Amino acid sequence: MKNQNNTRPTGRSRFKNRSAIVFSMAAAAATLVAGPADAQLARKPSYYQQQNQPQPEGPAAQLVPRPAVPSSLPALRSQADFDQLARVYDAGTPMQLAHVLFVVDRQAKPPRMYYIDTPRYQLHVRFLRDTRLAPNTVKREIDRNYLVPDRRFLFGTLSWQQNIGSFTYEFWEGDKLTAPLLRQAEQQVRSSFFGPVKFKTNSTLHERVAKEAGIDFVSQEALIREQPFLPMNLGTATGRVRIVEDDAGIDALLPDDIAVLRQVPIGLPPVAAVLTERPSTALSHVNLLAKGWGIPNAYVRDAAAVLKEHAGQWVALKVASSGYQVRRLTPEEIAALPPRAVRTAATGAVPGSARAIRPDLRESRLLPLASLRARNSAQCGVKAANLGAMQAAHIPGTSVPDGFCIPFAHYDRFMRANGLADRIARMQQQPGFASDPKVRQKALAQLRDEIVQWPVDAATAAGWRAAWQSQLGGGGVFVRSSSNSEDLPGFSGAGLYTTVPNVKTGDALEVAVKKVWASVFNPEAWEARAAAGFGAESVLMGVFVQTAIDSANAGVMITRDPFDAGHPHITYISAKRGIGIRVVEGRRVAEQVMYSSWSKAIQVLSRSAEDTALQLDEDGGVKEVPVEAGRNVLTDDLVVRLANVGAAVKRTFNGVDQDIEWATVGDRIVLLQARPYVERRR
């Protein structure tokens, strides 16, 4: 990712140049190169963030001798003036980004504009000191120029935005702009610049200030919509390009395939890499699976058309923050490819890699939420145990809907009574089961149907109903998976298993539990476990029966920047109205924001594209209801509260970054799940 100060990107100084993204395809038939995608945000350089960074060095520092250039100009009256002072990233490529730093001295009479020789001065403050404009200014005084209305200087950046073919000016996302300050900046820029220019907002505060000041602006979110490329998980892969048109194509995918998807599916079998034609969120099930598998994943506009010439061919794919590359492999390279790991006939697993939680089958009691702690993962799975730990943490302003765990012992007893092991052995002996995904999917579907029909011991089912009535009042419940092969440090299992929503009768509860049990044999779960090294015989399913809530909005958050691990102070939040099923499905773009606990800025990556929401149906299940399209899901206050809750959840789990499902009911944040955030790269 590019650092607008040309210093080495470390921690807080590593800016994402996301809204200045462009995209083009190289003419060479063997290679396609996508333009930059430092994911989604363009941020201006600031002393406030980067005062202690080392001086630039190496090629990136642009140390090529230059003609004599003034340290600054009071105005840019032509393109030549702009080019003379601009620093240009990736010059001569489709990724080219030209920008000039500027300073407005508000103390001068009249106020004075300085357009800075940007390759020469890495930061505004260095210009101030080197030119003796403010030679002895200490950090506290510099900070004032970002944080208070009565500041002396305005520090900004003026850039050429190739995505929209326009110049924009902007300020650091943490700059506490006011309407008078922005009006002054607008007047100074427009009177001193040769062409049309728009204010670019970098935070929700900037948007509010622009509206108050009556100044037209282009938002970060609007620029992101123009992005033709977005890297979701970086990495490299070799595989055969498969263009997938529908769900049948999803079902036919093989581990060697580089899947080019026209839609964002709910589930996906393990593949070598994923490219999608529709943008989704960092927290969609598909992207969480990709991160867990360590495979490249990116949004590429018109991917099917762009990659059509490679369909069925072996290629090398690289997804980087600055773009992607696809190169056709030579026959010699194809012949030299190492063999992929082979599933064992007995278990459907690649020997070795991952480990499920070793179950404790001695516990057969139904365990209420209030009694669950981390130690209970051996009886009930991590999902249920983590819910108990979050409730016990008493995080202010939050709650966890009540529920109880049906432990692994019930699954084990049920499956043994109905001969599951023999049934799996017969299934795996079917011709084509190991080699043909369609045969495998058909066999797994038949097994799931059988499991739902198998009888549950009457006393066991009666115990479930009694707990549902006595503890949860016989109201609607979500019947959720909590297996020993999900929510693990190295394997999230996101989206693999079934949740049955808003179950409202005792008979339906029994069927729902069996559906969750049967989801051990969902095709995507089978394939993902095989890729991770879980054998079928090692997997047991706990079930968490939890009070259903009808939320106003819901979503998922990650307690760090999913696009850049160097930003631990970032909380990423994805949200939609209604209950949260659709947030993780990823079929429509959710509202996405990022909050920095350091700059206190809220940055909008996208607004929700949904015009309907899911709510609980009084007759059971869920129903779709219309909502006002375009209305924001998240308020700034809710974003900050969610980020604080996320930090508390992270502390609850020993500082490990978390992937957290949440909802809101009234003023309360409801916690529905927390799992370790898993990311791997090839």
Image (cartoon, rainbow, N blue to C red):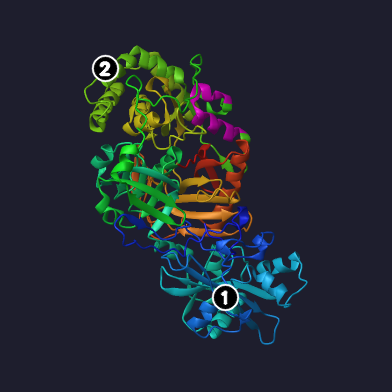
- Is residue 537 among what the camera can see? yes
Q: Which residues are magenta?
A: 375-392
Of pointers 1 and 2, the one earlier in the residue sequence: 1
Q: Which residue is mark 1?
A: 66
Whether the residues at callouts 1 and 2 have beta carbons within 8 Å, the answer is no
**In what element is the residue under mark 1?**
loop
Quick check: 62 left or right of 195?
Answer: right
State how many labels appear: 2
The answer to whether one can see residue 505 in this image is: no
Give left or right: position of 462 versus 248: right
Residue 142 point in image, percent of width and height: 71, 68
Residue type, numbered disc 1:
Arg
Viewer-nearest residue: 285 or 117:
117
Where does the image place residue 378, in percent across and percent down from the top left? 52, 22
Identify the residue at the far left of this view: 431
Residue annotated with mark 2: 426
Few, some or many residues within 10 Å of mark 2 (<14, 14–19, 20+): few
* CA gap, disc 1 and disc 2: 75 Å
